[in-house]
Amino acid sequence: MKLKFFLSALSLFFLSTSSWAKVVLPSVFSNGMVLQRNAEVAIWGSSDTQKEVVINTSWNGKSYKVKATAGQWKAKVTTPAAGGPYTITINDGEETKLQDILIGEVWVASGQSNMEMPLRGFKDQPVSNAEEIIKNAANNKIRLFLGEKVTWSNPLNEVKGQWQAATPTVVTEFSAVAYGFAKILQEKLKVPVGIIQVAWGGTLVQAWMSAKSLGPYPEVKIPEANNTALKDKNVATGLFNAMIHPILGYNIKGVIWYQGEQNRHEPENYLKMFPDMVNDWRSRWGIGNFAFYYVQIAPYISKTEKLSKALEELQPKVPFLREVQLKAEQIIPNSGMAVIMDVGAQNTIHPPDKQTVSDRLSFIALNKSYGFKNVAYQGPVYKSQSVNGSKVLLKFDYAKQLKFKGDAKESSNFEVAGKNQVFYPAKAVITKDGILVSASEVAEPVSVRYAFKAWALGDLVNEHGLPASSFRTDNWVIPM
């Protein structure tokens, strides 16, 4: 009887020790994941064992050994060229096996509602051509990780989610922009593509920034780090802590970002905070200046729309937010901005044409990240103005075969002002040297503005049909 009791106790001891030692991995390391190809990729987790944690990768038969420190371990493994499926086994006394792993290209998709917006759309706000896109979505070489929406008072080590192959059911709930981007890359590169979606609608850039990166902004209140969920998704640092911090270090090719609408009221702050956020993310990720490609906010709010008092006050600031996004491209290394001035929706902040957004982000990535130099990604960019009497000549870069959409002879998107800063609708005509702009009310022009309103459907494009951003030639003070 005593012997049976001893054997039972011994069995329970080994069982509890084995459970106690079992590796715990963040959700992002799971079956079906995509790892960045041709790289040294980090894998991490926790284990209470005092022994070595041994990692075996099936693609090269190699073993990697690491010891846990205070229960945490991290190792780097070498990945091959694209391929799979492969397995990874992690053993700390009990084996954990990850299966169906693909090696390819990994991107993070983040921002607010226009990035979050799934292919099924939002209530009464559909995504154009969604039914057809969803119907044809099955592709085992596209893997999607939909991160849970959480805001937290201090940095977390886990964001819940699950890697899933693209199917009609899966993509229905996934970002339309991010899925479209992945589909284009997969078709062009012929390799697996993984997207990690961590996005939440109606959020400020401050919520996506770390406490350290907000140090230069004493006016921003940082929550107490008391390990609790925050009541408001827009509390500073909350989304960085809960949705970005857990994936820091997961090797990626880059980030696609669609955000800014929630910061329309503070364009000057955004010009400083947005680059600071990118710089901080890159520093913490520890893989260098990965690509950071983002979308300029779309035109919206018609002057004929009945506006609330808040929107009336906000309306004049919207083009200035687009302007600082344009300027940020010159501040942030290895960045690119997708201009969508021609696909806005008059009375919604969520333009239904998400495919064009995906297309333009992919054009940037294919050209700048993957070396497809024949893929054009840049629309006309304002370069200079020269005044001759009552007329202003505007010159542009990336302006071959400059034209107005639909081959129109003129555009109604230009305005001219003299030194009194009063703008009048202008006549704009394309010449062999650029665009000649004038208004009969302005004898001595000083400034020209193009599509510089909350709502304006951009019509200035180049030979590739890519649009120009809204712009101004003055530096007059932004209205408060």
Image: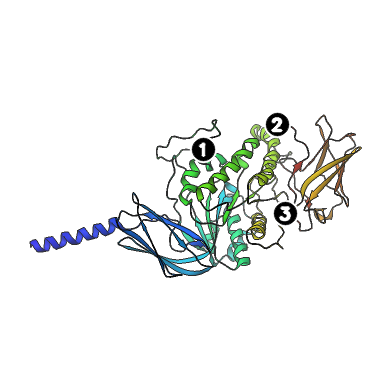
Residue type at tag 2: Pro
Separation (CA) of disc 1 from disc 3: 33 Å
The image shows residue 2 at horizontal and vertical percentages of: 8, 61
The image shows residue 91 at horizontal and vertical percentages of: 34, 62
Identify the mark at residue 378; answer none if there is no mark: 3
The image shows residue 216 at horizontal and vertical percentages of: 55, 34
Identify the mark at residue 236; answer none if there is no mark: 1
The reply to whether callout 1 and callout 3 are in contact (CB within 8 Å) is no
Residue type at tag 1: Ala
Is 133 placed left or right of 60 in the picture?
A: right
Residue type at tag 3: Gln
> Which of disc 3 and disc 1 is earlier in sequence?
1
Helix, strand or loop at mark 2 = loop
- From what the image shows, is residue 167 above or below residue 303? below
Q: What is the quadrant of residue 442 in the picture?
A: top right
Is 268 placed left or right of 459 in the picture?
A: left
**Neighbourhood count class around disc 3 (C-alpha, 10 Å): few under 14, some 14–19, many 20 upward:** many
Separation (CA) of disc 3 from disc 2: 29 Å
**Neighbourhood count class around disc 1 (C-alpha, 10 Å): few under 14, some 14–19, many 20 upward:** many
The image shows residue 118 at horizontal and vertical percentages of: 57, 54
Helix, strand or loop at mark 1 = loop
Separation (CA) of disc 1 from disc 2: 25 Å
Q: Is residue 297 visible?
A: no
> Which of disc 2 and disc 3 is earlier in sequence?
3
Asked whether 350 or 110 is in front, the reply is 110
> Which of disc 2 and disc 1 is earlier in sequence?
1
The residue that disc 2 covers is 479
Q: Please tell me whether mark 1 or mark 3 is closer to you in this view.
A: 3
The reply to whether callout 3 and callout 2 are in contact (CB within 8 Å) is no
For the N terminus, the quadrant is bottom left
